[in-house]
Structures are given as C-alpha cells and as structure tokens.
Image: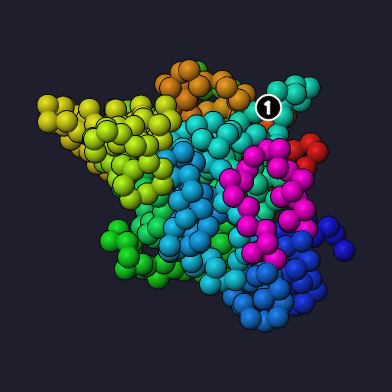
C-alpha cells in the first residue's frame, strides 16, 4: 500500500469508510509529519493529543460523517472552543474562545479531525505571512539552485504550507482580497473562495466584513469540493449568510466542459506582467479549448481601480472591526493610569505595524471630512466593478486569469514597500469586491522551479462551474511536482 500521507482526502475518506485503514493510523502518520515539519512554523497551536483521541472515537464508530477521520488544519482566525485563537496577533495571545465558529463546528460534526491552528498574517492582513506575531511561515518550495527561504503567500500562509508539506489533508482558510488563492498559487496547492454568503462568518475573527469569506486550501479540486461542501450552508447567526441549498459539488466534477464559454478579461493583460505568467495563462486557455470550451474575450473596464478601491474599503472596515480590541474584553491588557491610557497602551503594544497602518488609513478615510471623498467614492466604484462582472457574465460562464503576478518571493522582500506588497492582489481583488466565487489551481512551474497558479472566477453561487472547469484544467495541467525534501 502507498504511504498513508500520499492518499488524497477523497481516497483516505473511502479507505476509512471501507475499513482498509483506521483513523488512528491516518492521524498517526499526519502527527509525525506535523512534528517533522515544525521548522516551517505553519502551526501556532497544535492539538495532536485531542486529535488522537478523536481518531479513536472515529474507529470506535462514535464519530461519523462525510469527513470522518480526516486530519485537517484550521486557520487561526476561526474561533475554536477551548483552543487558543490568536488571529496571528499579540493582542489575542492567550484568548481561548468559549464557542466554535460555524465553519469549524460543521467540520467537527462531519467527523474531521483538527491537528491544530494554522499561522497567518496578523488579522489576515498581508500577502506573505510575514506580519504574524508568531513569526513568518516558510514556503517548503525553493528556487532551483537557490537556498533562500521564500514566503508561502498570505494571509493563509500556514494553511498553504501545511497542505503543501502534507502535514494535513486540507485546511480552512479565509479570503478577503486573495488570501486563499495567492498562497495556494505560491505553494502548488488548490484554493477556493466561495461566493460571499456561502460560508457563515460567525465566529471568524473579522477583518473586513463585506469581503471576508471562508474557504479551503487542499491538494486538488476534488478534495476542495468535498471539504467546501461541509463548510457551506445557511446560518441564521450570520445575517449575510445566503439562505440557499448547497449543491453536491463533488458530483459536479463531470470532467466535461464542452461548449462552456470561458471569458478572458482583456484588462488583466497588464503592461509589465511577467512573460512566464502570460505564457501560463495562454497555456491554460489552450487546455480549455482542447477540452471543447469556447474562449471569448471580455472587458472589465473598471479593473484598474480595483486595488485602490480595496485598499480603502478593507482598511475602513478593519478600523471599525478592530475597535473592539481595547484590553477590556479580549486577550491582552497593558495597564495605564487612566482608562484611555490603558486603551492606548494595550493597542500600541498589541497591534503590529501593518495592522496599525490599516487602522490609520481606515480611520482617516472614514473621518467626517474625508468620508465622501474616499469611502463613499470607493463604494461607488465597487458597485461599478461588480457591474462589469455582471455584464461580462451575460456572455460567458466562467473567467480564466492568472492567480498572482509573480511566483513566491523571498522572506523579507517587499516588507518595506507596502505598495509592491499590495500589488500581489491585482488579479484576485476584483472578484472579492464583487463577492464572486474564485479558485486557484496549480498549473505549472516557473523557470526557476516554483509553482504558478491559474485562477477561475465564477458567477454568484455558481461554484459548481468553477470547480468543474478547475477539475478539467487540473487534469490537463497534470501538475505533480513536489517541493524538494517534502
Ligand atoms: N493581501 C490582502 C491584504 O493584505 C488580502 C488579505 C486577505 O485576503 N485576507 O489585505
């Protein structure tokens, strides 16, 4: 039999169900892997003992469900009852939630077994996982002939690295402007962000509430579909949760995209884009065509305003959401002589530089004199960006673009240049602003041996077409490369 950690989620699920393997064996194999990859710093908190106890319960038939016995990781932005939840921030160090997020609770009731809480950029703000108070995560991939450590992308860098090193079968992640898709692209994994409203946000530490959406990073498209299925569904505890049934996404993977209309947004052919990324995009289009899809150029004229719009809307919402960390109710407190001084000391010590930058920008754009000029204007442009997509989706079923403008970069690179860092999101942010489902799949290697991703964007609540198309392209790409040593 193949090594246990070589089994996909789908295969492991079937092997447990047919009693070819036990959950204890599977969790044991993954526990060893978590221990042997600790140097990458993917986990903030491990829960390996609880995991083993749950695996025993699965084998005893006391825990059942569609993911019974499957070892997963949970991004440390999801509240987990009784297990520290930090959001990557010093201010939440030691915070042990008394309740579970809806998503982590659903996974638990489906029988999935969490091995722990995964590292991330502080409050999910970043593209490199380097803003985490708990230290950066290292990408298991390296450039050929170059030993420098690279970033795994962000903010779900721990989720991506843990899946890429096979320390978990799949992981939860969240995406506000690209934080599932970009790290998936940087680590040779698959990552899907469903439509805004598909997954409940209840119990997920809020960054920008009108953009935040939970999703999955997994090894392949089928595994992503299986886990996403468990996580989604209407939740009365989240007023923006969509009251819609969740289709069977695994059954949507028919392998057939004949006659499908795939849009290519012409505005995404940015001047100065890395020729390797453009070549990968062309290859993806050729694969789609060979599989019988029709390629149609579409226009999203407001694309050039998307990043600027995102970097007004997201910090504005963050500045409001993060007002709750005042040393009174959650996590850390730094005393002061007066109440105001206690607030100031707590927030000064508890938040890192990137979070402070966003709070300052957000507070500024929401302030009385600037609200109309920045925040209100950004909301109007956001509506135009969403309308561009709605218009284009009158003629196509799904769109295909690159995921990120570059492959993974070195640890420390771009840290002193926020604008260069923000440019990582250029292809992912428009779909976030429009609330659309989108997925990155590994599609090839750069000249220096790093994974590159292709990105599919779908119509609202049409994850099925995104997954079906991604599945076909995944087969055509035949991406089997692994990071050396893992
Ligand atoms: N990189 C983007 C940011 O820093 C997106 C983060 C995210 O999706 N959570 O805001």
Give the image quarter of residue 169: bottom right
Image side of residue 379 versus residue 50, left or right:
left
Residue 276, above or below 60: above
Image side of residue 395 versus residue 374, left or right:
right
**In the displayed image of the protein, which residue is found farthest to the right?**
1
Residue 320, above or below 170: above
Q: Which quadrant is the C terminus positioned in?
A: top right
Image side of residue 482 versus residue 348, left or right:
right
Provide residue 478's location: percent of width, then percent of height. Answer: 71, 46
Q: Residue at x 58, y 45 (%)?
A: 44
Q: Is residue 10 magenta?
A: no
* 35 or 109, nearer to the observer: 35
Q: Residue at x 30, y 34 (%)?
A: 336
State the extent of the magenta-drawn residues as a range.
29-52
Residue that carries the numbered disc 1 in the rendered image: 149
* 181 or 300, nearer to the observer: 181
């Amino acid at each position: 039999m193949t090594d246990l950690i070589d089994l996909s989620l789908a295969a492991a699920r079937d092997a447990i169900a047919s009693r070819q393997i036990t959950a204890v064996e599977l969790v044991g194999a993954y526990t060893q892997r978590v221990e042997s990859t600790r140097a990458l710093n993917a986990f903030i908190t491990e829960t390996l003992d609880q995991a083993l106890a749950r695996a025993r319960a699965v084998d005893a038939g006391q825990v059942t469900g569609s993911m019974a016995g499957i070892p997963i990781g949970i991004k440390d932005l999801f509240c987990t009852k009784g297990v520290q939840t930090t959001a990557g921030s010093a201010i939440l160090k030691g915070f042990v939630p008394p309740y579970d997020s809806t998503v982590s609770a659903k996974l638990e009731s489906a029988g999935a077994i969490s091995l722990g809480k995964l590292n991330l950029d502080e409050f999910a703000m970043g593209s490199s996982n380097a803003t985490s108070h708990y230290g950066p995560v290292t990408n298991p991939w390296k450039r050929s002939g170059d030993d420098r450590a690279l970033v795994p992308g962000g903010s779900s860098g721990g989720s991506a690295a843990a899946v890429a090193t096979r320390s978990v079968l799949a992981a939860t992640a969240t995406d506000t402007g690209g934080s599932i898709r970009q790290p998936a692209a940087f680590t040779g994994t698959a990552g899907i962000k469903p439509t805004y409203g598909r997954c409940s946000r209840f119990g997920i530490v809020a960054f920008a509430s009108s953009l935040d959406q939970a999703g999955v990073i997994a090894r392949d498209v089928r595994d992503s579909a299986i886990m996403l299925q468990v996580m989604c569904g209407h939740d009365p505890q989240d007023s923006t949760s969509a009251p819609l049934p969740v289709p069977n996404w695994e059954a949507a993977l028919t392998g057939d995209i004949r006659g499908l209309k795939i849009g290519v947004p012409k505005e995404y052919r940015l001047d100065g884009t890395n020729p390797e990324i453009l070549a990968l995009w062309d290859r993806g289009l050729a694969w789609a065509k060979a599989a019988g899809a029709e390629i149609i150029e579409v226009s999203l004229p407001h694309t050039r305003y998307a990043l600027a719009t995102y970097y007004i809307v997201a910090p504005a919402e963050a500045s409001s959401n993060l007002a709750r960390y005042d040393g009174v109710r959650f996590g850390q407190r730094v005393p002061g002589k007066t109440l105001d001084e206690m607030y100031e000391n707590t927030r000064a010590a508890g938040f890192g530089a990137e979070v402070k930058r966003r709070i300052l920008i957000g507070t500024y754009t929401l302030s009385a004199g600037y609200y109309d000029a920045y925040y209100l204007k950004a909301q109007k442009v956001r509506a135009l960006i969403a309308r561009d997509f709605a218009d284009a989706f009158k003629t196509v079923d799904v769109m295909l673009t690159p995921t990120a403008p570059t492959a993974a970069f070195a640890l420390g690179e771009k840290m002193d240049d926020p604008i260069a860092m923000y440019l990582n999101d250029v292809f992912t942010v428009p779909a976030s602003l429009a609330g659309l489902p989108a997925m990155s799949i590994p599609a090839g290697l750069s000249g220096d041996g790093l994974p590159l991703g292709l990105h599919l964007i779908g119509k609202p609540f049409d994850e099925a077409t995104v997954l079906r198309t991604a599945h076909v392209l995944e087969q055509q790409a035949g991406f089997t490369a692994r990071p050396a040593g893992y």
